[in-house]
Amino acid sequence: MESKLFLSSSPHIRDDVSIPKIMWTVNIALLPALLGSLWFFGLRALWLVAVSILTAVGTEALLEKLMKKPLTIYDGSAVITGILLAFNLPAGVPLWMPAVGSVVAIGIGKQVFGGLGFNPLNPALLGRAFLMASWPVHMTTDWILTRYGTMNGIDTVTRATPLKVYQLARDYLSAHQGVSPEQLSQAKVTLTHLSQAYRNLFCGNVSGSLGETSFLLLFVGAFLLFLKGYIGWRIPVSFIGTAALGAWIFGGTGRLFTGDPLFHILAGGLALGAFFMATDMVTSPVTPKGKLLFGFGCGLITILIRLVGGYPEGVSYSILLMNLIVPLLDRYTKPRRLGEVRR
Amino acid sequence: MKKRSFKGGTHPPAKKELTAKSPIAAMPLPEEVLLPLSQHLGAPAKPLVKPNDRVKTGQKIAEATGFVSVPLHSSISGTVKEIAELPHPTLGVGLAIRIEGDGDDVWDEGTKERANYSGLTPKELREIIREAGIAGMGGAAFPTHVKLSPPQEKPIDTFILNGAECEPWLTADQRLMLENGEGILEGMRLIMRTLGCQKGCIGIETNKGDAIKNLQKLSSAYGYEVIPLKVKYPQGGEKQLIKAITGREVPLGGLPMDVGCVVHNVGTAYAVYEAVAKGKPLIERVVTVTGTIVKNPQNLRTRIGTHFAKLIEECGGTTETMGKLINGGPMMGIAVETDEVPVIKGTSGVLALSQKEARYWEPRPCIYCGRCVDTCPMGLMPNMIGNLAEKEKFASAKEYGVLNCIECGSCSFVCPARRNLVHLFKYAKAKLTQMKES
């Protein structure tokens, strides 16, 4: 034989699903929500996302060049981080904020640990947490009104997110003193209005972070990933299910089992978090049971922060906290081996 | 038709259409054969001949050494040229007997048909099977008589004939079930008699509808049940097959006999039939010679010891330069160093890949997608074991069950980071064996 035969261990064929294929598919799955944000918040959304992506990819390229590591910017993972970070910002923040956030997300959230696969935390959420800690005023007040929507008149006055409005109203209702009868009745009216705003909440025509507002468009993208098998049902279902259950039991004013679970599912960043960030492969468990527990923990912390915490929204912190115990979850939820008898 | 299966598994492209419809053709008598002394799991056979000895077809040329070992027979008549370290399809090189043929194919006097073999006792049957040199023909080549000698405290209630043939590309078992179904069932009957076992099941994946139909038709006289199985790799894995058919799980580290089962491949059953009824030792087998670059892929009935090169030649050669040549199928087969290696008892297929198909996938770090965990038919966490093996943490890899790995390759196949997981597991297993010995 004149030519050498190639030797390697079995198997000798591989599936065509590769890291770049998965990552670019996730980017495609984020497109509906991205287009939605353009529709709701105008061209400004595009600038924020563009700055975020460019900085994320640029930071990754620069750091890999400095560390003399193979360039991974074409695998699409830095692009995801860029989009998700922008999605987590109020639409009215200045353009330097996504840039700073992306540098932190890629630099400290990902490359410091060795790049894709080694990061313990979701990079985009780490970037967001950094911005939240550093510029809390921008991060909690730079909301802008959606182009067409009002929520039965509420947010035209306050410009706050539905969850913020909800928090204020609940505070009034549960306060025992210092609240006038007018404020009390207004709070009641507000809560009624909120629970009548399902359609706008579902479509995303409400104030909020750039890419989080539309449950519908996020679900469309997530469903594509589910069909491709790149995300499973366990994390989103247990995350959203736990949060909804918690909202129903404890979310009412006064009595148990009077909360509004649907409002909690549709409002805020739950859909974005449960579909796209808690399901991040690198920072979520690999075992079926681990995934259920992970989603449960995320849902629990989210509803805890929303109902009794200082922030109106708790999705991103809940995911970051749960990210930290992923190795433990994996270790204690090993699947049962074929033929294994457990005592 | 209810299809039974197991948990996990994957769906590699089957590629069986290349050879599934072509009847088994007879490979011309080879001019030379290489007969490795180690073709089976266990102790290598000990040569009974020396260079320049004349041998006949079917003559015993090496004897078993110990219980877990089988003898070896010459597959052609001719002259022993040398006993030396020669190319081996799974070991690289191995001690082998090279025989130059005389072209006459004169059979040994001992190979006579038995007119009446129904009076043979289990003990006699076991002895005939062992003397015929039969080792599992599905690929693992475990000595058949050992599996037929369960200790008394492990009664066998179910015998399973493995016709799953889940390995992509290969169709040798399928063709055998279509063309030699009677022989297979007769072999199955003999095996069950040896085991003293009443219930016989035949597991076949539903992508082989013709084989299912044929064996269903033939087996009604025997009272065996043909069980259609879901098309899913590795459905033909012994433990996966037992789980699918009986619902029983072979205990970790245990054997099928621990749950009252014995499994044999259809090729093995046919070899048992030939050994008992025709007095023929195992000197030939059906091999699927295939690949997109092979001109006329087909199933060949060939003598053991035939060079791979001759098989490819018989199939019209290749349309482009070969990049990889595999003993077996693409999922579990072993890449060989040269086409001078011979067909051995466990060679179910010869697969030629083009240089493009033989590409090397540069592995990347694990991204914890969990696809390997979902697909592992043994319920392991391949990602963890791979990472531990890479860091040489073999004791931890053992805790995560690396020794339970059946090396089916499903995890490597689905890994989007292209990690060489099976390679890492084999490495960890070898290291663990080394550590145990020292």
Image (tube, rainbow, N blue to C red):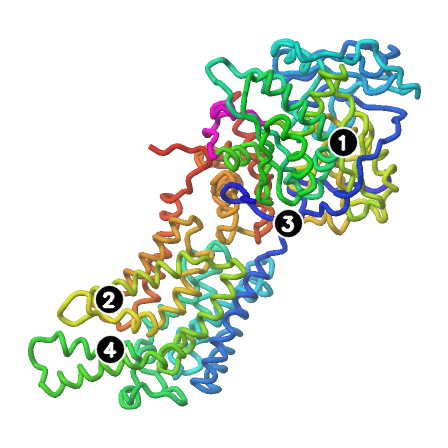
- On screen, residue B100 above or below A23: above
Q: Amino acid at mark 3?
A: Arg
The magenta stretch spans which residues? Answer: B247-263
Check chain identity for marks 4 and 2: say if they share one: yes
Question: Looking at the image, which is closer to me, A203 or A78?
Answer: A203
**Marks 4 and 3, how far apart in space?**
51 Å
- On screen, residue B217 above or below B255: below
Query: Residue sitting at 67 percent across and 43 percent down?
Result: B209
Query: Residue sitting at 36 percent across and 55 percent down?
Result: A294
Q: Crowdedness of circle 1 by 10 Å Cα count: few (<14), some, many (20+)?
A: many
Mark 2: secondary structure: helix
Label 2 resides on the chain identified as A
Q: Amino acid at mark 2?
A: Trp
Seen from this angle, which residue lies furthest right?
B103
**Marks 3 and 1, how far apart in space?**
27 Å
Exactly how many numbered labels are in the figure? 4
Q: Which residue is mark 3?
A: A14
Q: Crowdedness of circle 2 by 10 Å Cα count: few (<14), some, many (20+)?
A: some
Query: Residue sitting at 43 percent across and 62 percent down?
Result: A109
Q: Which tag is nearer the camera, tag 4 or tag 2?
A: 2
Query: Residue sitting at 52 percent across and 35 percent down?
Result: B245
Mark 3: secondary structure: loop
